[in-house]
Image (cartoon, grey):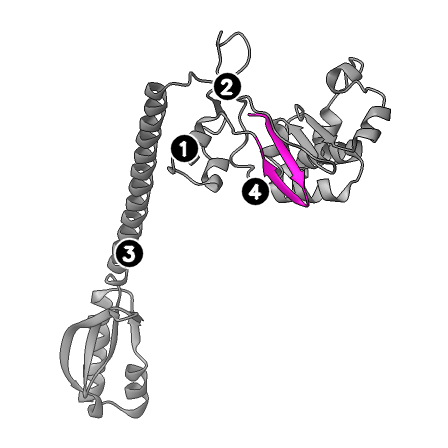
Amino acid sequence: DSRIYLFRDGSLDQVTADHTFVQRLVDSGRITQEEAAVHPRRSVLMRVLGDVDSSPEIDTAILDTQPGDRWLLCSDGLSSYVSDDKIAAVLSTFSGAKDAANRLVRESLDQGAPDNVTVVVVDVGDNADSASNPPLTVGSAALPLTYEADSARRALRLPTLLLHPLKSTQHADSHFEPESEEYFDELILEDKRRAIRRRITWLVGIALIIAAIVVALVFAYRWTQMHYYVGANGETVAIYQGVQQNLGPISLHSVYQQTSIKMTDLNPYTRSTVEDTISADNLDDARAIIERLAASANG
């Protein structure tokens, strides 16, 4: 999962190929680079150096270089958290290899990378300059073994971690899986099964939400139908069931009982009251209101 980049004439190119499961998916056209960045198996390595595989397949190549080239060797602590555009910007801004390497490490840590961020920047000069430069010890051999409590540094990085766009898909520790077509196909099949389970989970969740909304609407409608009021229905008085509201095209009230009381038989004040509707506590109360209106009309 480490990489080698070549920065030449303002352009950054990745020289090595990632020996990861997601890179195999990208190479086969199954996913994009953007999808690989957040894939749940992005930390699965298909090749490693060490005692896991006694005879790993090693990629070797002879590459041409020229004065002015800048080579970058880095672990996934840099490439997984800092974009290629940002890396290119740093390499073009800092003229010194050491300053560029330090800046790239700082960029990685600021973006929430783990502590194992390794960056080596090598500048290619002309033959005369190369011959006059003394050899340098680099890497872990150049630094004494010291212990530094990282709680303070992690505390300072906490706001950045909270705001990082990939905080919900934290970079898991890399681990090795054997590179074989059978195992590769097995991983793809397992990912498909996981994707199907996720889709089913989403569909079930959406169905439950829709069902909850429907149940809530049914109960709300039933609640409205437990109310009654008295109002005018054309030229006569009627008892209405529901509430005097509409929910879009849906009417929440209807005529429950039509009476023979004419609006013209009521005095002006009572007629105005009926036109504005008279709320009733229940159906019996609505019928009592009708009896009083009938008595008023006959009187």
What is the CA distance from the residue labelled 2 to the residue labelled 4? 24 Å
Residue 85 in view (yes/no) = yes
Q: Tell me which label, 4 or 3, sits earlier in the chain.
A: 4
Q: Nearer the viewer, mark 3 or mark 1?
A: 1
Task: Look at the numbered disc 2 and give the secondary structure of its residue.
Answer: strand
Picture residue at 27% right of the left edge, 53% below the top: 214
Kindly indicate whether the residue at mark 4 contacts the one at mark 2 (C-beta within 8 angstroms): no
Q: Is residue 235 left or right of residue 127?
A: left
The C terminus: image quadrant: bottom left
**Residue 257 marker:** none
Local crowd size for mark 4, using a 10 Å CA cut-off: few (<14), some (14–19), many (≥20): few
Q: Which quadrant of the structure image shows residue 1? A: top right
Q: Position of residue 92 (x, y in %)?
A: 73, 43
Q: Is residue 6 magenta?
A: yes
- In this view, 107 is above or below 58: below
Viewer-side label of 2, 4 = 2
**In the rendered image, the vertical position of residue 5 relative to residue 251, given as above or below:** above
In the image, what residue type sits under mark 1? Leu
Which stretch did the figure color magenta?
1-15
Q: Look at label 2 and name its amino acid.
A: His
Look at the numbered disc 4 and give the secondary structure of its residue.
Answer: loop
Q: Earlier in the sequence, mark 4 or mark 1?
A: 1
Q: Which residue is mark 2?
A: 175
User: Residue at label 1?
Assistant: 25
Three-letter code for the amino acid on which mark 4 is drawn = Pro
244 in magenta: no
* Residue 218 on image: x %, y %: 25, 55
